[in-house]
Amino acid sequence: MKKNPFKFGSIVDEPYFTNRAEEIKKVKSILISENHLILISPRRFGKTSLIIKVIKEIAQPYIFLDLQLITNTEDFAAQLLKRIYRIYPFEKIKQIIKNFRVIPNISLNPMNNEVDISFQPVSSGSVLVEDVFNLIDKISNKKEKLIVVIDEFQEIKKINKELDRQLRAIIQHHKNINYVFLGSQESLMRDIFEKKNSPFYHFGYLLPLDKIPYQDFLTYLTAGLKVVAANPDKTAEEILELTNSHPYYTQQLAFTVWELINSGRKSKNPFEESVSEIIRHHDMDYERLWNTINKTDKKILIGMSLSEIAPLSSEFSKKYFPGASSTIFSGLKRLAKSGLVIKTETGYEIDDPFFKRWIKARRLL
C-alpha cells in the first residue's frame, strides 16, 4: 500500500521535513555554542519542527513550553517543573525541590501516568519561577547541556506584566543552558529583543524564519507526487501558485491532492477538486471566523482576495478606501496581530489561501 509522503498539522520530522538546509546549519551552530536563539516567523511556518529536528540531531536534552497555554505565574512554574520530571529521574531532583521556598503539590495521574504539579498562589510568583529555573540550571551541565524552548514568547507579559524582567534577572546568570525563544508576532518579539529599554534587549541571536524557497519546495513536491500523478511537475506548480509556498498550507494541499489521485476516484482536475474539498471542510469555521471580523477589516480582506494589488499601495486605497490610507494600515496591523494576515518580504498577504478563496467565492456568488 502506498504511503502519503506529505504531512501537516503536527511537528514534522523525517521523511516529511522539507529542506531548510541553511536554517538547520545556522540553528545547529547557535545551539552548540554558548548563545541563545530567538526564532521569529508567522504561525505554521515550521519553527517548532525546525528546532526539534536540530535538537534531535545534536542529541541534547530539551524541554518545550508554549506560553499560549499558561494561565498565570504559578502555572508557568508548575508546567516547567512537570516537563523537568519527564526527562530527569525523581531521585536526581528531589533534594533540590526540598529547598524550594514554596513546596509544589506533586501527584501521579493514574489515567496517563503523568506527574501532576501545582503551586499554591503566592504573593510573589517570582519566587516560584526563580526556584524552578535555578533547578533547571543545577541539573544541566556542559556535557549534556539542556535546551529550554519557550514558544509564543510574546505572550509573557499577558501572564504577568513583570515576568519578563523577573525572568531576565534569573536566567542571565545561567551558564549550562541554551534558551530558545519562539514567536509568531514579529513586532512584539522585536519589541522584546531589540528595544533598548527591554529586559531582553539583545539577549540572543535573532533569526527570522521565512518561507521555504520556491525551487526547494517544487523539487520536494514533485518527488512526492510522481508516485501517483501523471504530471507531477505541473501539479506541484499549481499547488505552490495557490499557497505561495506557505509551509503548512502547501503540505495540506499536497496531502489532499495525493490522497485524491491515489484513491483512484475519477477526477478531471484533482488539484481544483482538492482545493474545493478543503474549503468545504472548513466552510463553517470560515463563516464563524468571518463573523468575528469588523467591517473595515472585512473590506481589506475582500480587496486582498479579489485583486493582487498591494494593500498599502495608493491604487488599493483609491479603489477600496478613497482618502483613508491610514485606515488600511491600522486594519492590516490588527489583521496581522490576529494571524489572519502575515507580513512577508514582499508585503502583506492573507495567511490562509483557502480562506482567501472562500472570501472570493462568497463575494462572487
Image (cartoon, rainbow, N blue to C red):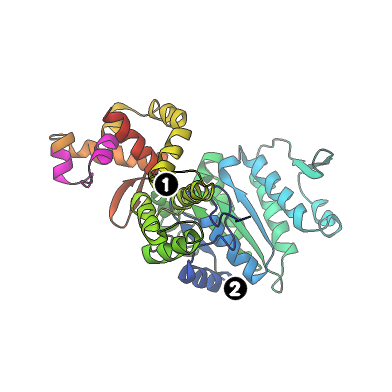
* Residue 346 circle label: none
The image position of residue 204, as x and y in percent, is 50, 64
Q: Which residue is mark 1?
A: 270
> Quadrant location of residue 350?
top left
| Disc 2 element | loop
- For the N terminus, the image quarter is bottom right
- For the C terminus, the image quarter is top left
Residue at 76% x, 42% y is: 117
The residues colored magenta run 300-318
Predominant SS of the magenta segment: helix
Q: Amino acid at mark 1?
A: Pro
Observer-nearest of 307 and 194: 307
Residue at 37% x, 62% y is: 214
Observer-nearest of 161 and 349: 349
Residue 172 visible (yes or no):
no
Give the answer, above or below, for where 55 lies relative to 308. Answer: below
Image position of 41 (left or right of 330) = right
> Quadrant location of residue 316?
top left
* Residue 32 circle label: 2
Q: Is residue 312 magenta?
A: yes
> Quadrant location of residue 337?
top left
